[in-house]
Image (cartoon, rainbow, N blue to C red):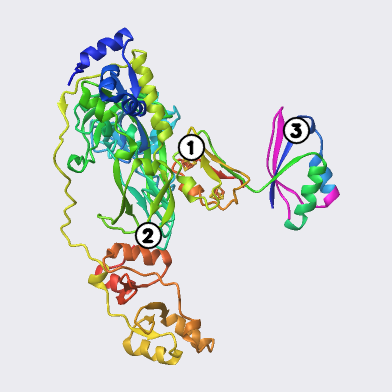
Amino acid sequence: MKARLKFDKQRTAEPIISTVVLKTKALINILKAEVDESAGEVLIEVPDDKAESTIAAFKQEGVAVQVGGFIEISRQRCIDCGHCITLCPVQAISAEEDLTVKIDQDRCINCGACVDCCPTRAISMLQ
Amino acid sequence: MKTQRTIEEINEKIRRGEATVVTAEEMTEIVKSRGVEVAARDVDVVTTGTFGAMCSSGVFLNFGHSDPPIKIENLTLNGVEAYHGNAAVDAYLGATKMHPEKKFEYGGGHVIEDLVSGKEVELIATAYGTDCYPRRSVNTTITLDDLNQAILCNPRNAYQRYHAATNGRDELIYTYMGKLLPQYGNATYSGAGELNPLTNDPDYETIGVGTRIFLGGGIGYVTGSGTQHDPGAGFGTLMVQGDLKKMSPRFLRGGSFTNYGTTLYVGIGIPIPILNEGLARKTGISDSEIKTSLLDYGVPRRNRPILKDTDYAELKSGKITLKDRTIPVAALSSLKLAREVASTLKRWIEEKRFLLTQPQERLPSTGSLKPMKISRETLFAQNIMLPAVTCRAEEDIDTVAKRIVEKNVNHVVVVTSTGTLCGIVTSFDITRAVALKETKLANVMTHQVVTSSPDEPVESCARKMKKHDISALPVIDAEKNILGIVTSERISTLFGEYR
Ligand code: SF4
Ligand code: SF4
């Protein structure tokens, strides 16, 4: 299972991930980490049997946890054509009033159907 | 006609900062709410815009001479081959030429985007060497600034309108109209509807040879009607050119169509001077008045079946009805960027940075399109199919095995009592059944059969077999009656090895 952790400003210096690993004994794999002065975002992979306890442990530490939906549209490349909208089986992609195309991360089931349809290769699946 | 003005009068107003300029979408609203007469009186210029994949795009490049000089024979830019059939250091790079190792991902369109973004591009050239141009190879990097000229020159852009596409096959297909889900699962279209340049001047009254336009974020010109210009059918096109050095990557983007090819997305905007009420009325056109058809791209023929008539209002709504279904539809072009093109052009005119031009010659407004002349006749499944050897699902393996030997075939088509298709069994399936001591045919046959229609071109049959890694296609009619069978063996004997 993959999950995205969001740390706020004060907590980025603390060893939260290590604390959770010690507590849950889950082998957490860090796939991607982005930390700047305002906040930190880390994409992790957890063995499925430890998923629940790990999420609970992070939440206890006050970390926002997001599960599923790891698809990203590059605003730089997207031309807002809308082709991807027609391919999404769960209607996770939609166009706003001003035609900007957006993915609803909570709906996305990470199926990948939209990725190779994009004519500007704006869609990427976070690995 | 009450309102009459000339392009010169409009330019005078632009210079004085007094011209009223609106986008084609705004014009539609004005005509609807205040009428043609008022619109003609109040509006001087209507700006149009489109932003779509324009495969017929490319750029003429001049690299200047090296020392010693070279007469280039073969040339690649970032690995993409450019056409070099002109003078020593000129070349034409086409948008659809693909990188041999990055097929469908990187091509001429992307090189053009890289150039216009100011990136370095690797140039590798070879030559045979002559007395006057002795150099045999060049390996260097260039940027747009290093080039003497870079002229975007597109022989067929800005289609007046285009049809919409969907897919009636049982399988997913990748086309130049995008990724189309099986059984009419989605649909795509192209074009900006009421914002589209030629749609607003359907009789080519103001757009002609020499018309100054917005091209790729810079300034360009219409140099004539485009290739495949088909005014009779309402499918006019333009040939355009402009200085790439003045363009912007916002309005020129490399495009990738999986399993089809690469292309270039181009933003084009054309100003339409409102010379009279007729032009006010024409530029007042709304999406619901722009008709087009939804075609079945599942049929790989030049004339694809029309599933229904539609219009740009329905297409832009995001949903299209087909019989009793509603399917999602979206553009491959960008309406959002088309709007940005039209409003940028509007701003340029308001800021007195862009004046209108009088066309030097009108575009042809009659004539139609010829299909390609094929000197060798095209063959279809019905021309090459063989009679199918059939059996019933209830028959036992032994009987079917005997029939395979007797008739010397590799495929037996399984039929129902009324003779319609229900499966297929190969000699390999039978061998396996014997080895595993399986006696029931139903347990070894394939139930999901890939089939062909009688009028499917042989090339398409061959592609299908390759794609599914099979060696025969039963040919069936709409009622699933067996008409025959096309085998890869038959195709190979007739035409030699198929790739
Ligand atoms: S297909 Fe690509 S370019 Fe088109 S809207 Fe989706 S992400 Fe954007
Ligand atoms: S990955 Fe699948 S579910 Fe997620 S947005 Fe793309 S098509 Fe929809």
User: From this viewpoint, is residue B63 visible?
Assistant: no
Mark in the foreground, 2 or 1: 2
The answer to whether marks 3 and 2 sit on the same chain is: no
Which kind of residue does numbered mark 2 sit on? Gly
How far apart marks 3 and 2 lie (CA) works out to 51 Å
Q: Chain of mark 1?
A: A
Q: Is residue A42 magenta?
A: yes
Residue B56 pos. (x, y %): 29, 39
How far apart marks 1 and 3 lie (CA) works out to 29 Å
Q: Circle 2 is placed at which residue position?
A: B168
Q: Quadrant of residue B418?
A: bottom left
Name the residue at 28% across, 65% down: B458
Considering the numbered disc 1 on the image, is that residue within a helix, a strand or a loop?
A: loop
Q: Circle 3 is placed at which residue position?
A: A8
Name the residue at 14% across, 41% down: B367
Q: Chain of mark 3?
A: A
Q: Is residue A63 left or right of residue B176?
A: right
For this rendering, which residue is in front, B313 or A12? B313
Q: Chain of mark 2?
A: B
- The magenta region covers A23-47
Name the residue at 31% across, 7% down: B16
Which kind of residue does numbered mark 3 sit on? Asp
* Tag shown at residue A78: 1
Q: CB of mark 1 within 8 Å of CB of mark 3?
A: no
Considering the numbered disc 2 on the image, is that residue within a helix, a strand or a loop?
A: loop
Is the CB atom of the residue marked by disc 1 within 8 angstroms of ligand 1's nearest atom? Answer: yes
Mark in the foreground, 3 or 2: 2
Q: CB of mark 3 within 8 Å of CB of mark 2?
A: no
Q: CB of mark 2 within 8 Å of CB of mark 1?
A: no
Name the residue at 83% across, 52% down: A25
Which kind of residue does numbered mark 1 sit on? Cys
Residue B29 pos. (x, y %): 36, 28
